[in-house]
Image: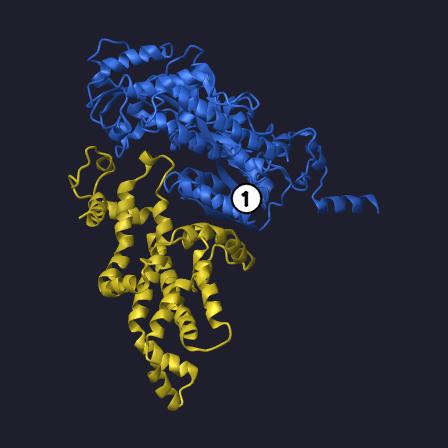
Amino acid sequence: MIRREFLKKLGQLGIGAYGLSYLRFCGNAGKTVSPNLLSFSVKYPQTAWTMGVVDPNITGTFKIMSWESAFQFEKWNLIIDKFFKTYYPKIKVQLDWGISFANYNMKLPVLLAGGSPPDLVWMHDTRVKSFSSIDLLQKLDPFIEFFKPDGWPNEYYATQVEEFQYDNCQYGFPYDYATGGLYVNLDMYKKIDEELPTENWTFDDLLRVGKKLTKGNRQFGLNLGSEASAEYQYWVLRSFGGDWFNADLTESKFNLPETIEAYQWMSDLRWKHKVAPVPELTQGRPQPFVDGVIAINFDLGATEFSDLLETKFNWTIAPTPRGNKGRFQFIGGSALSIPQKAAHKHIAYELIRYMLSNPENLKIIGKMGRMFVSRMSLYEYGLPQGKSAQKLSNYKKVFYDLARRDGIAVPFISKYQEWEDIYRRNTELLYFGEELNAKKVCLKLHDATNRFLESANSKKKV
Amino acid sequence: MAVILPFVWMIFSSFKTAGEIWTFPPVFMPKKFQWSNYIDAWNALPFDRFLFNSIFVTVCVTVGQLFTCSFGGYAFARLRFPGRDKLFLMYLATLMIPFPVLMIPLFIIMQSLGWTDTLKSLIVPCLFSAWGTFLMRQFMMGIPRALEDAAKIDGCSYWQLYWKIIVPQCKPVFATLGIFTFMGTWNNFFWPLIMINTIGKKTLPLGLVMFQTRIAAETPWHLIMAASCVTVLPILILFVIGQKYYVKGVVTSGLKG
């Protein structure tokens, strides 16, 4: 077989000039790598945003699936439309958007399991490890190596880059991030002789003020980390020195005295100090802070933002406190991923790179969205505009500077949803006041978590 | 009151502003009726297309099911062939298989037929119903055999027996099954969610959730309520017209659809 024919055969198999180089990338060293044969043979003219691997005149359908709603998808639509018109004009783009988050997470597994995956999907940090651990997502590392995105990875939040990795491989390219802060009702606050919370406040400082701000069942001083949602509590227990798991995610840390102390503190807010509303008072009340029932409320940046502008009281934002073991700030976010069996992986990656590392496009996403984009240098496009900008002069500090400094990755293990069910079943006892002793709950959760991790890790080994 | 209140709440909420939706304690009546919500909702998404798709799919499935179920019911009730009762029991047993079990195999079948993202995929798998066949069979078993015997003496074929004797006798059960199928198909959400990927092929229930965002506070509930009012209108009209058959259906089948 002459050399040309041999190379042609290799090309047909999808092993191009660069195809084998990625084997040295991520993944377990001893694990048999089943290379998803990717060709990186440059056959066509390269541009700033295309690799030259795919024929610009390619025809077919490129499928995108997103949970963004009718109004939020507009910004993406603009960019996607421009990309395909410029670089792949003959490709038909099929956009499946406007699927609510819960429905999205039901539909996507069916499409993946049914062998009809989209080419590009929206991926949440709570799920990326679950999908990638069962080989449903494509590793992005070979693409990143071959056609590095602008500013990657140094200009992106390290916590987010890490959040979308599994087994040291990158499975999602982050596009936005949400972080937590305190929303303060200034009308309530000015009646007590206290300074506004700063990042140097301790949890005790906050509790002291919370007590002053509480007026029976009419007004509650503090609503902080007391929701039953696991990820919103994680930063609190890390501040106390606690944790969920050990570093290699094989053992529970719910038996640590610091972990127990953190959960006891959160439970006591509601049931001992009575500074946080009990569930009966907040159920059916979608935004108790907006309704003027809570003085200091923990929530994500931008979550309540536009709704708060319509409220009748003065308000501001403030940083979350620090604990005995330092200050930690919640960070969560979303990414774009490529399914393992996607038909147009190269184009999908080019589109990801075009949307999420091109400053011009990130400006559009930042301005039209409600959160910061994941590329830190473009934070300014996620800041409030106009009157809100004047009113919230510390927005950047609370939701950008401190997040960048103290942001923490939540350990979303694979099968996180399964584990979260166990977590909820146990911690809800504290949330609903059925058990007031956090130690009992934590020790029970410790055993259940260890059983879960043991089972999950043994299956992984098999 | 408990039944009607959510409905009335939906109607009034469809005229509220986004801010009024979130007010606590909740206000029942909007300060000013925002008629523009209906126009905004209609303009934000192609609801005319969703409406057409919903009507098309629902009519096809309803008419199709009336035929297939009545054929099946007639065969199981009136024709004699080996293994008839066992076959019927087996068919009936499929009612016990939950949909999530069938979902992926059914999806793969649709995919291999090249029917994903087509309205065919919403129509064809729904043309057959074990429950509908059961309903028809039970009703047809109550029709006196003498009528058929007389027709046979007059030289009627099986088709003529079905069409000229059985079908006219079965009008009430046709109406019942028609209403149940219409309502079920009109409100069907999960299967269309899986099968349909493009906006032009979405049905009304899928269109409604396109307003929903990951963060509840960002969802324009006032527009969803306006669109929901329009969505519910055909089913409401049908229910008012066929109320007695609906009730009869519940009594006959012991099921609420």
Q: Give the secondary structure at mark 1.
A: loop
Is residue B92 shown above or below A89? below
- Which residue corresponds to mark 1? A119
Residue drawn at (60%, 32%) of the image: A458
Residue drawn at (38%, 30%) of the image: A370
Q: Which is nearer the eye, A321 or A248?
A: A248
Q: Amino acid type of disc 1? A: Asp
- Tell me residue A1's x, y (percent): 84, 47
Is residue A242 shown above or below A385? above
Q: Which is nearer the eye, A404 or A246?
A: A246
Is residue A186 shown above or below B53? above
- Tell me residue A203's x, y (percent): 35, 13
Toward which corner of the image does residue A319 lie, by quadrant? top left
Residue drawn at (31%, 48%) of the image: B43
- Tell me residue B123's x, y (percent): 43, 61
- Give chain A's shade: blue
Toward which corner of the image does residue A207 lie, by quadrant? top left
- Tell me residue B188's x, y (percent): 37, 54
Residue A210 visible (yes or no): yes
Number of callouts: 1
> Pointer 1: residues within 10 angstroms few (<14), some, or many (20+)?
many
Query: Residue at the right extreme?
Result: A1
> In what quadrant of the picture does the C terminus of chain A appear?
top right
Residue A317 visible (yes or no): no
- Give chain B's shade: yellow
Is residue A33 shown above or below A119? above
**Disc 1: which chain?**
A
